[in-house]
Image (tube, helix red, strand yellow):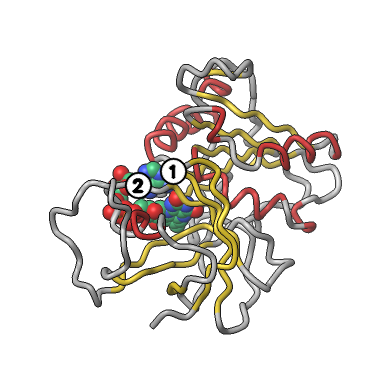
Amino acid sequence: MLNATLIKRIEITKELLILHIKPDEPLKPFLPGQYVALGLPGSAPRPDNFPEEKNPPKPDRLIKRAYSIGSSPENLDWLEFYIAVLPEGLLTSRLALLQEGDRLWMAKKITGTFVLTPVPDNHNLILVSTGTGIAPYISMLRTQSTWTAGRKITLLHGVRYSSDLAYRDELLKLARQRESFSYYPVISRKDPNWHGERGYVQKFFEEALIKPDPSCDHIFLCGNPAMIADMQKLLTPLGYKEHTRKEPGNLHVEKYW
Ligand SMILES: Cc1cc2nc3c(=O)[nH]c(=O)nc-3n(C[C@H](O)[C@H](O)[C@H](O)COP(=O)(O)OP(=O)(O)OC[C@H]3O[C@@H](n4cnc5c(N)ncnc54)[C@H](O)[C@@H]3O)c2cc1C
């Protein structure tokens, strides 16, 4: 049943993990922004200090959840994931104890429509995320084909504390290297270590710090469904329409729950 190995575990904080996972079988090509299911059996251990489960799963039940891929498809050796550990979460409370060399399950099929294929090469990207919702954008930004000539890319990342800003160094470096790239981290809680933007990612649009043009800026929203609902309310009157397989649009949405 278990068909993949954790080859690298990076702890951003106790609750935020970057995992590199290598499946036993060769990876098939995928698109930046797509996701795959990971899983562990109910018998997998959980940390002693996490709340006891009211309805523990059967030991042989495979608990599966979807995770956006953070690595680029230019590397097909392993996949990177950025995962929030929820002490009451069925799967993530078990993923929390995985160590390098441990085994887990990965679905064979990588899928998802939260991708750049529908965006014309000469259109700009505004990538809006909360928490681990930054993962699909990391995959996009690490992939050469995203950087079409003349395209501007803006990334907003909303988190609670500055310590939650995974990928910050990589993104600051990218912003120094590429004039066409802007990175705006924003912190929602009191944090004496933080001297940058405060509040929620929505404020950039509410206060017109970013003025998107629906004729040439595609907007992507990923993460917390409350942020996505707020943003949809703000963007619809400006001429934004959700992209679906049947009806193309300029607003792309990936809700994590
Ligand atoms: C397409 C897709 C891609 C996803 N990619 C990622 C990813 O890259 N990283 C990631 O951490 N999660 C991601 N998720 C969420 C993930 O699938 C699980 O829902 C999450 O890890 C919780 O699983 P669990 O079994 O531990 O919690 P469960 O026992 O299933 O509890 C679920 C509850 O946890 C909360 N929750 C779920 N996800 C999060 C989160 N990310 N942060 C805070 N609270 C949350 C919600 O209240 C939700 O109702 C994605 C979801 C979808 C649909």
Residue 112 versus residue 76 in the image, above or below = above
Quadrant of image for the N terminus? bottom left
User: x, y percentage for residue 71?
Assistant: 65, 59
- Answer left or right for 11 relative to 213: left
Q: Residue at 50% across / 40% down in the picture?
A: 13
Identify the residue position indicated by label 2 in the image. Answer: 86
Picture quadrant of residue 27: bottom right
User: x, y percentage for residue 233?
Assistant: 42, 30
Tag 1, which secondary structure? Answer: loop
Q: Residue furthest left?
A: 54
Q: Identify residue type, mark 1.
A: Glu
Q: Identify residue type, mark 2.
A: Leu
Count the numbered circles shown.
2
Q: Mark 2 packing: few (<14 Cα in 10 Å), some, or many (20+)?
A: some
Q: CA distance from mark 1 to mark 2?
A: 7 Å
Q: Residue at 19% across / 51% down in the picture?
A: 52
Q: Is residue 204 visible?
A: yes
Compare marks 1 and 2 and give the one earlier in the sequence.
1
Tag 2, which secondary structure? Answer: loop
Q: In front: 162, or 101?
A: 101
Q: In front: 39, or 203?
A: 39
Q: Residue at 31% across / 63% down in the picture?
A: 45
Q: In front: 75, or 235?
A: 75
Identify the residue position indicated by label 1 in the image. Answer: 15
Q: Are marks 1 and 2 in contact (CB under 8 Å)?
A: yes
User: x, y percentage for residue 87?
Assistant: 31, 47
User: x, y percentage for residue 150?
Assistant: 84, 42
Q: Is mark 2 within 8 Å of ligand 1?
A: yes
Q: Mark 1 packing: few (<14 Cα in 10 Å), some, or many (20+)?
A: some
Tell me the tag on residue 71. Answer: none
Q: In front: 173, or 228?
A: 173
